[in-house]
Image (tube, rainbow, N blue to C red):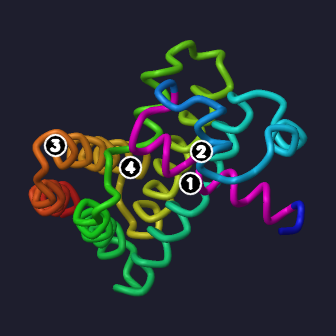
């Protein structure tokens, strides 16, 4: 395996383990055992476990936002309909057998110091998602795009929490119905 492939492999394995067992619930030795990568190789790529967690979150952020944008754009060319399609994207995610709730909420709850790099990475993800919603709200011609984005975001966050805790993927449909009322 090439050096870059080893780094990506570590991020992928660690990410899956963090999702299932929490960030503090998985130690470096466990990641090494699961990944088959030597400890020295892990530390060559990541000086600390926190650096690994930040890398995992950065990769998850990019993948999540790209997938949501692609999903919404594939469903419609109208920005208001794209905003609503983001809830359909959530519902599909909630049905995934590997859905363990929001990894960014989990990270921010385990690393709740606002100055901690893990917390900051989680915050960055959340802000970028709101920025995407605001971009769509602005393109849809809504009178207060920032407020509409905040409302849509709250509905997303609530649906994610309900889907996780209650094991109810239909929370996305309920949130979508509420969002449809806001976008008129």
Q: Viewer-nearest of labels 1 and 4?
A: 1
> Residue 32: where, in percent of width, then height?
68, 43
Q: Say whether residue 181 is left or right of residue 90.
A: left
Q: CA distance from mark 1 to mark 2?
A: 5 Å
Query: Is residue 7 inside the magenta stretch?
Result: yes
Q: Residues within 10 Å of mark 2 (few under 14, many from 20)?
A: many
Is 69 drawn above or below residue 41 in the view shown?
below
Towards the viewer: 151 or 60:
60
Q: What residue is rendered at 41% in x and 78% in y?
A: 71
The residue shown at (44%, 81%) is 73
Q: Is residue 72 magenta?
A: no
Give residue 123's quadrant in the image: top right
Q: CB under 8 Å between callouts 1 and 2? A: yes
Mark 4 lies on residue? 149
For image coordinates 90% across by 41% down, the residue present is: 44
Q: Which residues are magenta?
A: 4-23
State which tag comes first along the sequence, 4 or 2. 2
Q: Which residue is mark 2?
A: 57
Q: Earlier in the sequence, mark 1 or mark 4?
A: 1
User: SS for tag 4?
Assistant: helix
* Front residue of 122 and 97: 97
> Residue tagged by mark 3?
162
- Which percent across, then down, holds residue 113? 56, 12
Q: Is residue 178 visible?
A: no
Instruction: Look at mark 1 in the image and give the residue it sits on.
Output: 60
Magenta residues, dominant SS class:
helix
Q: Give neighbour class at mark 4: few <14, some 14-19, many 20+ (Cα, 10 Å).
A: many
Does the image show residue 99?
yes
């Amino acid at each position: 395996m090439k050096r870059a492939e080893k780094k990506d492999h570590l991020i992928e394995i660690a990410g899956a383990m963090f999702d299932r067992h929490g960030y503090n619930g998985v130690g470096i030795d466990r990641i090494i055992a699961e990944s088959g990568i030597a400890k020295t190789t892990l530390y060559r790529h990541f000086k600390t476990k926190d650096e690994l967690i930040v890398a995992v979150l950065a990769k998850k952020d990019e993948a999540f936002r790209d997938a949501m944008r692609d999903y919404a754009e594939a469903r419609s060319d109208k920005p208001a309909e794209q905003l609503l399609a983001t809830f359909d994207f959530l519902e599909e995610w909630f049905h995934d057998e590997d859905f363990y709730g929001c990894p960014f909420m989990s990270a921010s709850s385990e690393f709740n110091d606002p100055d901690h790099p893990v917390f900051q990475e989680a915050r960055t993800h959340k802000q970028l998602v709101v920025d995407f919603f605001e971009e769509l709200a602005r393109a849809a011609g809504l009178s207060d795009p920032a407020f509409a984005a905040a409302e849509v975001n709250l509905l997303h966050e609530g649906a994610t929490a309900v889907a996780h805790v209650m094991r109810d993927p239909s929370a996305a449909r309920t949130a979508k119905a509420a969002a449809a009322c806001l976008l008129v």
